[in-house]
């Protein structure tokens, strides 16, 4: 059978149109725009995208099965494994925290006060339950002079972790109030107690044990004094007086202005300077622990 020239021309035109159509032809589209060509069949199973799964976390004290119920802060980090800074993907403060996570590698961390624990977790699309353990205790501080408790508002504490030969170490927290519960990893801590705003300071090394509260009373040897500039013993104090409390060697311990300001000082010997109306007056005095009293400077010649 022989093709006529017109038929050969038509066949060639169809072939050229298919080649030019390219992807359209592969997708089952008629190169002449009439549609209707069947799409090629897709072979093999279609797999669903991985779904999120529930991760449930809890924490107990080390060495016991007692769960921690409060004071917790959970964070979930994406574990990139390339040295890059991990990104936080979820947070919670629940005692038993739950997170919906896509498949991948994560790091779960929990903090309990200043104590913490962490764990690497691999999620694969199935629910998981993990438990972390924290070795922690707590510290509660107060102060006294002899058998007399010091008012909490007059005390302030700083807590340090001893480091090498450093007399104090690395600061954990300052401005701790009396009676406040500080959750800490088990270990030994250096505590500095300040009574008032001057030099009444006491120090102690205290041990925090796992699962226990360490109650410690810091004993101060100090007194609170009321400073006065008077014309005669027992007379009315002059207002607007500037006072300076010095050591016998001349170091300034405290400065105050007023008719009768109060200062808390460690026991020992001091020099009191009073300045009023361009005049300067002074006297030596002694502080005895627990003996709160007035210290008067007499303005001689007034």
Image: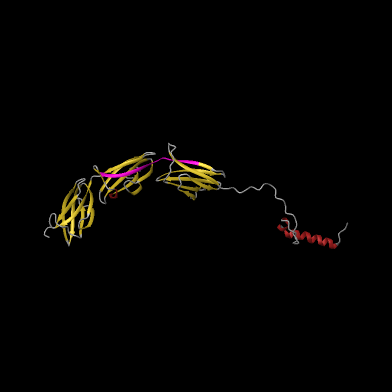
Residue at position x 84%, y 61% in the image: 7
Q: x, y (%) of residue 145?
A: 24, 44
Residue at position x 36%, y 45% in the image: 182
Say if the magenta span includes residue 143. yes
Residue 141 occupies quadrant: top left
The quadrant of the image that shows the C terminus is: bottom left
Is residue 248 visible to us here? no
Quick check: 177 left or right of 241? right
Which residue reaches farthest left?
301
- Which stretch is magenta? 130-144
Q: x, y (%) of residue 174?
A: 34, 49
In the figure, 144 relative to 260: above or below?
A: above
Q: x, y (%) of residue 149?
A: 26, 45
Quick check: 38 left or right of 242? right
In the figure, 8 relative to 178: above or below?
A: below
Q: Nearer the viewer, residue 272 or 52?
A: 52
Which residue reaches farthest right?
1
Quick check: 2 left or right of 219? right
Residue 140 occupies quadrant: top left
Quick check: 210 left or right of 8? left
Q: x, y (%) of residue 42?
A: 70, 50
Which residue reaches farthest top?
63
Say if the magenta span includes residue 190. no
Residue 186 occupies quadrant: top left
């Amino acid at each position: 059978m022989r093709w006529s020239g017109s038929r050969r021309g038509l066949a060639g035109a169809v072939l050229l149109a298919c080649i030019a159509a390219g992807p359209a032809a592969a997708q089952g589209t008629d190169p002449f725009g009439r549609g209707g060509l069947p799409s090629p069949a897709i072979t093999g199973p279609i797999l669903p995208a991985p779904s999120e799964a529930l991760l449930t976390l809890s924490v107990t004290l080390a060495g016991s099965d007692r769960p921690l119920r409060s004071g917790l802060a959970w964070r979930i980090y994406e574990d990139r494994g390339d040295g890059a800074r991990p990104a936080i993907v979820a947070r919670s403060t629940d005692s038993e925290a739950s997170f919906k996570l896509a498949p991948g590698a994560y790091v779960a961390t929990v903090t309990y006060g200043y104590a913490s624990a962490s764990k690497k977790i691999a999620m694969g699309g199935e629910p998981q339950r993990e438990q972390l353990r924290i070795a922690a205790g707590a510290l509660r501080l107060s102060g006294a002079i002899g058998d007399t408790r010091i008012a909490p508002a007059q005390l302030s504490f700083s807590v340090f972790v001893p480091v090498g030969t450093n007399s104090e170490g690395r600061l954990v927290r300052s401005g701790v109030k009396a009676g406040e519960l500080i959750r800490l990893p088990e270990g030994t801590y250096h505590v500095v107690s300040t009574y008032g705003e001057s030099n009444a300071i006491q120090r102690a090394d205290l041990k925090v044990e796992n699962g226990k509260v360490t109650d410690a009373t810091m004993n101060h040897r100090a007194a609170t004094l009321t400073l006065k500039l008077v014309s005669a013993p027992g007379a009315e104090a002059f207002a607007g007086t500037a006072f300076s409390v010095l050591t016998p060697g001349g170091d300034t311990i405290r400065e105050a202005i007023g008719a009768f300001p109060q200062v808390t000082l460690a026991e020992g010997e001091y020099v009191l300077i009073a300045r009023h109306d361009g005049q300067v007056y002074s006297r030596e005095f002694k502080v005895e622990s627990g003996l709160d009293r007035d210290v008067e400077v007499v303005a001689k010649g007034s």
